[in-house]
Amino acid sequence: MAVVGRAPAAGGEQAAWPWRLAREAAIFVAVVVLAHFLVHAKNEVWIAWAAASRGVETAVIIAEQMASSGMWAFGEFLQVLS
């Protein structure tokens, strides 16, 4: 879409699509990495809080998570998507 009152540049939007594709891919990767980092950080805080509130070591909480790792992995996946 051209701006009214301006002539399109040589090559126009045809030349800009590789840069737009690269920018969109970089933004997508950045958002996914940030979401993964935030979910991991939240889980670290949750493990520490659960261990402190139950009066057990963090290894106990992690062992419980590992025993039902499929459920925890699916829940983390849903958190990244939302």
Image (cartoon, helix red, strand yellow):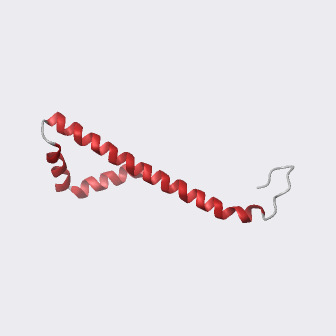
Residue 58 relative to residue 21: left or right: left
Number of marks in the image? Answer: 0
Q: Where's residue 53, x and y in %?
A: 17, 34
Which residue is at the front of the view, 61 or 78?
61
Which residue is at the front of the view, 26 or 69?
26
Furthest toward the top, the residue is: 53
Residue 78 relative to residue 19: left or right: left
Residue 22 relative to residue 32: left or right: right
Q: Quadrant of residue 9?
A: bottom right
Residue 3 relative to residue 54: left or right: right
Which residue is at the front of the view, 82 or 57?
57
At 38% from the left and 49% from the top, the residue drawn is 37
Q: Where's residue 12, x and y in %?
A: 77, 62
At 16% from the left and 51% from the top, the residue drawn is 63
Q: Is residue 46 above or below residue 22?
A: above
Q: Is residue 40 above or below residue 19?
A: above
At 32% from the left and 43% from the top, the residue drawn is 42
Quadrant of the frame with the N terminus: bottom right
Q: Where's residue 50, x and y in %?
A: 20, 39
